[in-house]
Amino acid sequence: MGPDLTSAIEPGTAARGRAGSYAWLVFAVTTGLLLSDYMSRQVLNAIFPLLKVDWLLSDTALGSLVGIVAVMVGILTVPLSLLADAVGRVKSIAAMALLWNLATLGCGLATGYGQMFVARLMVGVGAAAFGGVGAAVLMGVFPASMRSTINGAFLAGSIFGSVLGLALGGIIAAHFGWRTAFIVMATFGIMLALCYPLLVSDAAGAEPAAAEAKRQLLTWTGIRGVAAELFATPSLVWALIGSGLQLTVIASFIAWMPSFLHRDYAMATHTADAVGSVFVLIAGLGMILCSLVADRSARLKATRKATMSAIYCFLTTGFLAIAFLLPHGLAQLALIGFAMFFSGGAAGPAGAIAADTSREAVRATVMALGTLTNNLLGLAPGPILVGLIADHSDLTTALRTIPVIGLGAAVAFLIVTRHYSRDTRRLPSL
């Protein structure tokens, strides 16, 4: 499993606050798999019109092909992450990535809706725990002082992967057919999956754990113990709640910006999609840079990770409140752009806080709880809530209302500042 590379690991590098070349290699290949994950998920959206014509599918059937992935992620993310903590994260990641990419290949070979549905279900099974387990691997090879930045950059990969999946999938499908789009995405991912265990070692940054201790994680007593430990850590709980609530805002605007631009600014559909993707990229860039600022600020006082997260939430809500008081025009769009820049800024620090206040042995499970919270509180309900409000009034009113949730996220992060120092002192080491 990559003896030449892993033998070059400097023991204690993360603890001393330095990130070596090996850590950046792990970041590159793990983030590459995250890109593959979201490219495999989103390529389907790019070929909806072609699939609808070829198989005469209803919109409900098309939507189910998307929804089944999210359903499987929601159901399996925590149990599969707990399993990865017990049996080894690197080999678990390689197995997950191989599964979702083989399933993506199956999408390209499917001859009907039933086969496609099963293949998409398996994409969800494969991708279910990757976000949490991948983040846990990165938390182990980078110093605690860089956790917000690394987690924010890793999470931003999901945004960039979504954009790549839509853009490249559409281009490939237009020139070579929709089946080729799936095959190309799968080929890229399979190559990375096969290389991953050759380049990355479970030994990097991990605390030594006896085999018996790992097996204990999979017993009912062990699971109850982990749950009791996590829910007795206020900083961890409130950081995950704050991140989930704030993602309601970013998910809502990512989903509905093209429609807002089409309806309120009378942009053609393809123009609204293109401009909407710019706002998505702004959110991804902001997620990285805001996380970097949070890490730099935390060098002076550790609780500033939470303080900066609260500030990002307040700024997002403030910019959007002002934007929707203005008439349609460049000023309004600019303010929405500023809001999108800060909208994902709390995601990286929230993950770092969760890592800082949990034991390394169960960190993949902790990060999986973050994935679950982000989906249940933010990514899933946000776009639906906007739609419900819009049905009873209009889309502009809905987008004007939804940012209020960001105030709740800010309060959650302010609560974290009261408990963070005590919760980190409870651990033997970061």
Image: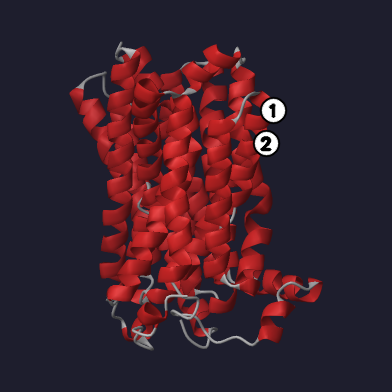
Q: Which residue is mark 1?
A: 114
Give residue 204's position: percent from left, percent from top. Answer: 44, 79
Residue at 31% x, 81% y is: 17
Say which residue appears at 50% left-offset and 76% top-offset: 202
Decide: is 190 above or below 304.
Answer: above
- In the rendered image, which quarter is residue 142 located in? bottom left
Q: Distance from label 1 to label 2 (Cα)? A: 6 Å
The label on residue 328 is: none
Q: Position of residue 148 (x, y in %)?
A: 36, 64
Q: Secondary structure at mark 1?
A: helix
> Are there few (<14), some (14-19), or many (20+) residues within 10 Å of tag 2?
some
Up/down of 73 relative to 308, above or below: above
Local SS, label 2: helix
Q: Residue at x 48, y 28 (%)?
A: 179
Vertical position of residue 57 compared to residue 185: above or below: above
Q: Is residue 240 visible?
A: no
Q: How far across and down, in percent of the image, does residue 3 sit?
A: 42, 81
Q: Residue furthest right?
A: 220
- Residue, x 45% and y 64% (percent of image)? 196
Q: Give amino acid for label 2.
A: Val
Q: Answer few, some or many: residues within 10 Å of disc 1's Cα (few below 14, many 20 plus, some between 14 and 19).
A: few
* Residue at numbered disc 2: 118
Viewer-closest of 389 and 230: 230
Dots 1 and 2: beta carbons under 8 Å?
yes
The answer to which quarter of the image holds residue 262 is top left
Three-letter code, disc 1: Gly
Colour pattern of the rendering: secondary structure
Please tell me in which quadrant of the rendered image residue 311 appears.
bottom left
Left or right: residue 337 compared with residue 63: left
Residue 66 to residue 138: above or below: above
> Looking at the image, which residue sits at the far left?
330
